[in-house]
């Protein structure tokens, strides 16, 4: 149940700021249009934990065949590491953030939600939680999920 004070403040803001209300309606309308265009048998809908958010991924990415390797898809998401090299020193500077910020935030959200449900992400989380903490671990989980999504989407499973 929502806090009544928060509801009043948000309704006041909607009344005083009609642009914000219109902007939110436009986002919801655009999402529903994309969601309506996703076929019911799309391969990403088979991925546990993705569900309806697959519409956002499909809408942002378009055709995954334009990414020949998972590394290029991860770079498009902005989750590729920035590595500086000088002589023998190799320094990691975090993720590049060059890619689509909406896709990156969607993958962060999906990784956090699925890290305890998806067995692959759970094993990854368990093996990396002693070395990585906080946002670094979240970025690593999102990167792993991006690679999984690319592989499921690029080469769908075909039972023989």
Image (spheres, grey):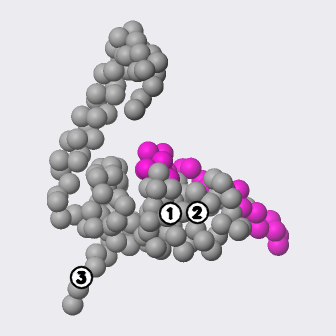
Q: Is residue 104 above or below residue 49?
A: above
Residue range highlighted in magenta: 85-108
Examine the structure image and report whether residue 150 is included in the region drawn in magenta: no
User: Mark 1 sits on what residue?
Assistant: 115
Q: Quadrant of residue 9?
A: top left
Tell me if residue 143 can be seen: no
What percent of the width, then of the height, locates residue 58? Answer: 30, 55
Of circles 2 and 1, which is in front? 1
Q: Name the residue at 71% across, 68% down.
A: 130
Decide which of tag 2 and tag 1 comes sooner along the chain. 1
Tag 2: Cα neighbours inside 10 Å, few (<14), some, or many (≥20)? many
Decide which of tag 1 and tag 3 comes sooner along the chain. 1
Q: Mark 3 touching mark 2, by CB under 8 A? A: no
Tag 1: Cα neighbours inside 10 Å, few (<14), some, or many (≥20)? many
Residue projecting furthest to the front: 1
Element class at badge 2: helix
């Amino acid at each position: 149940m929502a806090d009544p004070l928060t509801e009043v403040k948000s309704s006041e803001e909607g009344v005083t700021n009609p642009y914000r209300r219109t902007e939110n309606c436009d986002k919801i309308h655009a999402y529903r249009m994309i969601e309506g265009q996703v076929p019911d048998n799309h391969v990403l809908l088979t991925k546990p934990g993705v569900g309806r958010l697959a519409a956002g991924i499909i809408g942002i990415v378009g055709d995954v065949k334009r990414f020949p390797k998972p590394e290029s898809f991860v770079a498009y998401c902005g989750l590729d590491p920035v590595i500086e090299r000088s002589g023998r020193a190799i320094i990691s500077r975090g993720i590049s953030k060059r890619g689509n910020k909406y896709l990156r935030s969607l993958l962060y959200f999906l990784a956090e939600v699925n890290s305890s449900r998806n067995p692959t992400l759970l094993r990854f989380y368990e093996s990396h939680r002693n070395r990585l903490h906080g946002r670094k671990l979240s970025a690593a989980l999102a990167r792993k999920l991006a690679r999984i999504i690319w592989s499921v989407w690029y080469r769908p499973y075909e039972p023989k």
